[in-house]
């Protein structure tokens, strides 16, 4: 199999590259290094089955030879990143998805879109099921990301219905693990960096908003299973174990007994979703998938990684 992974030099993408290489695939990693980095894939560079193509997927991409799978993961993903790059975010969700679908269609390849729980916006139903249409503010600061991904889902379904491309859509919930950027602004690297530097943990709002965190190898396993299933509707992949942001801050402080860190409260960003937890019934029934790494273990592994880069 020959698999193209856009965004392959990012956090999730680099773990995907590893998994597909381990399965024996040839991997073509396409990335413009906007929010990713060569260090995430440097250990793969000597593998003859791995190729890095520095390219902005919002521009058309020509690939010589056959392609069996196109996984489209290119996009800024943390709120700080997409707020800093709103137009590239909209372009990669729209033009980038169009180009990646065009490549899949030309090569008669399977296509998998990295969508997000953000398509549900600030959800009015809880937990979130795939048949919920969401509550998104299109003109708010997060709109550049949420609407780009909603457009990406729409064009993916259009290519499926109109061009009969074999498409898959994964709606990814908050995922964490090694190779997240310490300064990407997401809550987990923020808190871990702060606790290791003896700084105060910056809880936004009262910290009573909830999230549900999935360890990256569990996500990758769900994606691998979905790609090989015959199912074009969206599938949630995430860990349903939900906690408040304040509880997360306390858990992370407790992991480093020597830390002098305390908690400070900063303003809550606009349109910050109040609650988020995936209903994973579809993934369980369709893919026989369940998360296997609990938060204690996942946080431990991630903290070990951040100790090496802080
Ligand atoms: P990341 O920022 O680490 O990775 C994104 C990668 O895409 C980076 O390497 C970046 O350089 C690349 N990229 C961005 N624009 C590009 C372009 N125009 N052309 C080529 N490459 C481009 O983020 P991540 O957390 O690994 O997220 C990967 C994907 O998963 C994204 O599509 C994101 O929306 C989705 N996702 C992630 C999460 C999560 O919790 N990590 C949750 C929901 C969805
Ligand atoms: N958050 C926080 N402190 C930080 C960063 C984030 O309290 O330093 C909160 C943020 O307001 C949100 C949650 O943590 O409620 C998760 O934020 P993140 O940016 O990781 O991802 P989101 O789920 O909002 O996309």
Image: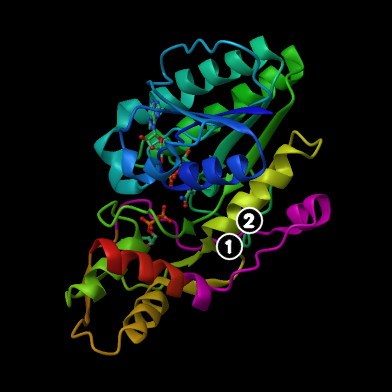
- 73 within the magenta span: no
Looking at the image, do the residues carrying marks 2 and 1 touch, with CB atoms under 8 Å apart? yes
Q: Quadrant of residue 3?
A: top right
User: Mark 2 = which residue?
Assistant: 128
Residue at 45%, 34% (x, y): give it: 7
Residue at 32%, 82% (x, y): give it: 253
Residue 80 in view here: yes
Left or right? Give the position of 234 relative to 102. Answer: right
Q: Earlier in the sequence, mark 2 or mark 1?
A: 2
> Secondary structure of the magenta portion, mostly?
loop
Q: Is residue 272 above or below residue 298?
A: above
In terms of image quarters, where does ligand 1 lie?
top left
Instruction: Say few, some or many: other residues with alpha carbon within 10 Å of mark 2 (under 14 / 14 to 19 / 20 or more).
Output: many
Q: Is residue 64 above or below residue 79?
A: above
Q: What is the magenta range? A: 269-298
Residue at 75%, 33% (x, y): give it: 232
Q: Quadrant of residue 285?
A: bottom right
Left or right? Give the position of 26 relative to 268. Answer: right
In-front residue for pair 188/7 = 7
Left or right? Give the position of 156 relative to 289. Answer: left
Is the CB atom of the residue marked by disc 2 within 8 angstroms of ligand 2's nearest atom? no
Name the disc covering residue 277, or none.
1
In the rendered image, residue 234, in percent from the top left (x then y), is placed at: 68, 40
In the rendered image, residue 203, in percent from the top left (x then y), is placed at: 28, 70
Element class at badge 2: loop
Tell me the quarter of the image containing the C terminus. Answer: bottom left
In the rendered image, residue 189, in percent from the top left (x then y), is placed at: 32, 62
- 288 within the magenta span: yes
């Amino acid at each position: 199999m020959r698999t193209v992974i856009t965004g392959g030099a990012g956090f999730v993408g680099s773990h995907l590259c590893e998994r597909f290489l381990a399965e024996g695939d040839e991997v073509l990693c396409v990335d413009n290094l906007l929010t990713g980095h060569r260090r995430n894939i440097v250990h793969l560079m000597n593998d003859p089955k791995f190729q890095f193509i520095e390219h902005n997927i919002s521009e058309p991409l020509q690939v010589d030879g056959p392609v069996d799978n196109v996984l489209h993961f290119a996009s800024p993903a943390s709120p700080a990143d997409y707020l800093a790059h709103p137009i590239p975010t909209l372009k990669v969700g729209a033009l980038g998805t169009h180009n990646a679908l065009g490549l899949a269609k030309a090569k008669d390849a399977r296509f998998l879109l990295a969508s997000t729980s953000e398509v549900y916006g600030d959800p009015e139903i809880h937990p979130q099921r795939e048949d919920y249409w969401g509550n998104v503010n299109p003109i708010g600061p997060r709109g550049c990301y949420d609407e780009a991904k909603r457009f990406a889902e729409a064009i993916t379904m259009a290519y499926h219905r109109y061009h009969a491309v074999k498409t898959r859509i994964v709606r990814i919930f908050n995922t964490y693990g090694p190779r997240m950027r310490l300064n990407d602004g997401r809550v987990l690297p923020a808190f871990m960096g702060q606790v290791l530097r003896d700084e105060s943990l910056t809880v936004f709002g009262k910290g009573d908003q909830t999230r549900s965190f999935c360890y990256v190898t569990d996500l990758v396993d769900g994606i691998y299973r979905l790609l090989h299933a015959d199912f074009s509707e969206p599938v949630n992949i995430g860990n349903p174990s939900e906690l408040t942001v304040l509880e997360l801050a306390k858990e992370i402080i407790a992991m480093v007994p020597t830390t002098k860190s305390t908690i400070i409260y900063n303003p809550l960003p606009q349109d910050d979703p109040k609650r988020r937890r995936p209903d994973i019934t579809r993934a369980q029934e369709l893919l026989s998938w369940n998360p296997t790494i609990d938060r204690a273990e996942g946080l431990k592994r991630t903290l070990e990684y951040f100790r090496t880069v802080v």
